[in-house]
């Protein structure tokens, strides 16, 4: 009995949603919420034998607007205000999303690249390859990455194709790693600044404050220009249900599951949350300062 009690306390601590080791982020708070379904304001869901299908692709604007793609179940993007109110619905496939500083939304899907105004009007669309990632630079240029071809295509904000290259643009950060005994020595170079630090990370996202967000699975470390970790956040795998819903001799059942982190332009961290009856987008708010 003592072993089971210790195990239960360990699991509940491990999967607690408030895992802020440093004082940089606070939360989570719910930003968007809706039940499963096909109506506006609801979210598509399909149960599978090994995994479920539901929305996992979304983007956050500088003003906190959230655009959610319902691929692969629906060719639909629902746009919510920062307060969680449904603002617009765009009937279009979208496998990658991003916003620019003006609130324009860029979508990639079915070999098309599209730009929508903040009011939801289609500004332009261009034939393209199958882009899986989209980025907007400070200049307003859009960079679209095709994972299959390993190419980066750069577009002007008016849709004009500037160039296509297999080299990662410096504006997205050039990563160099050297393995040490238990971690990597990492350099991430940008046109105006180079970050040097140690750790084990997969992805690097710079926010508007000039800090670098180093991501490993569901963990985010915010790093300043001196290579110092100024914020640390771990998104839980899930929240356990009441003890009676799972057998202590087996793996626990989660009452809620969380996705991987998405870094907003202001440095807040967003992710999706899935329960048996509902879907939501939650965020952790960055309370620290900018890079010096």
Image (cartoon, helix red, strand yellow):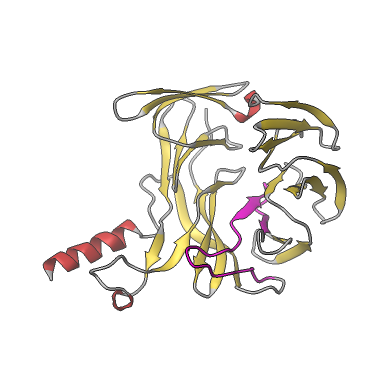
Q: Residue at x 61, y 37 (%)?
A: 208
- Which residue in the rendered view is the most extreme toward the left? 2
User: 256 or 47: nearer the eye?
Assistant: 47
Q: Is residue 277 left or right of residue 72?
A: left
User: 76 or 67: nearer the eye?
Assistant: 76
Q: Position of residue 111 (x, y in %)?
A: 77, 45
User: 259 or 223: nearer the eye?
Assistant: 259
Q: Residue at x 39, y 57 (%)?
A: 18
The segment highlighted magenta reads 41-69
Does the magenta-highlighted stretch encompass residue 52? yes
User: 92 or 90: nearer the eye?
Assistant: 92
Please determine whether, in this image, residue 103 is positioned above or below residue 186. below
Q: Position of residue 265 (x, y in %)?
A: 62, 43
Quarter occupied by the N terminus: bottom left
Q: Is residue 4 left or right of residue 213?
A: left
Q: Position of residue 101 (x, y in %)?
A: 72, 41
Give the image quarter of residue 219. top left
Please determine whether, in this image, residue 85 is positioned above or below residue 196. below
Please determine whether, in this image, residue 250 is positioned above or below residue 180. below
């Amino acid at each position: 009995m003592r072993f089971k009690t210790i195990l239960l306390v360990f699991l509940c601590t491990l999967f607690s949603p408030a895992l802020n080791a440093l004082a940089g982020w606070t939360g989570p708070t719910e930003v968007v919420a809706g039940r499963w379904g096909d109506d506006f304001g609801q979210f598509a869901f399909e149960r599978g034998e090994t995994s479920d299908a539901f929305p996992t692709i979304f983007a956050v604007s500088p003003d906190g607007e959230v655009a959610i793609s319902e691929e692969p179940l629906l060719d639909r993007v629902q746009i919510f205000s920062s307060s969680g109110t449904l603002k617009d619905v765009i009937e279009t496939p979208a496998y990658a999303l991003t916003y620019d500083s003006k609130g324009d939304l860029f979508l990639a899907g079915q070999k098309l690249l599209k730009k929508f105004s903040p009011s939801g009007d289609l500004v332009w669309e261009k034939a393209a390859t199958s882009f899986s990632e989209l980025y907007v630079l400070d200049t307003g240029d859009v960079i679209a990455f095709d994972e299959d071809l390993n190419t980066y295509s750069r577009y002007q904000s008016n849709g004009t194709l500037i160039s296509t290259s297999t080299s990662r643009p410096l504006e997205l950060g050039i990563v160099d790693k050297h393995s040490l005994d238990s971690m990597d020595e990492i350099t991430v170079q940008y046109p105006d600044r180079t970050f040097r630090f140690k750790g084990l990370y997969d992805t690097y996202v710079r926010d508007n404050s000039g800090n670098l967000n180093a991501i490993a699975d569901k963990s985010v470390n915010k790093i300043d220009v001196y290579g110092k970790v100024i914020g640390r956040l771990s998104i839980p795998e899930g929240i356990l249900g009441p003890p009676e819903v799972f057998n202590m001799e087996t793996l626990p059942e989660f009452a809620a599951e969380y996705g991987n982190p998405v870094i907003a332009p202001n440095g807040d961290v967003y992710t999706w949350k899935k329960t048996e009856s509902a879907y939501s987008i939650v965020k952790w708010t960055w309370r620290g300062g900018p890079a010096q």
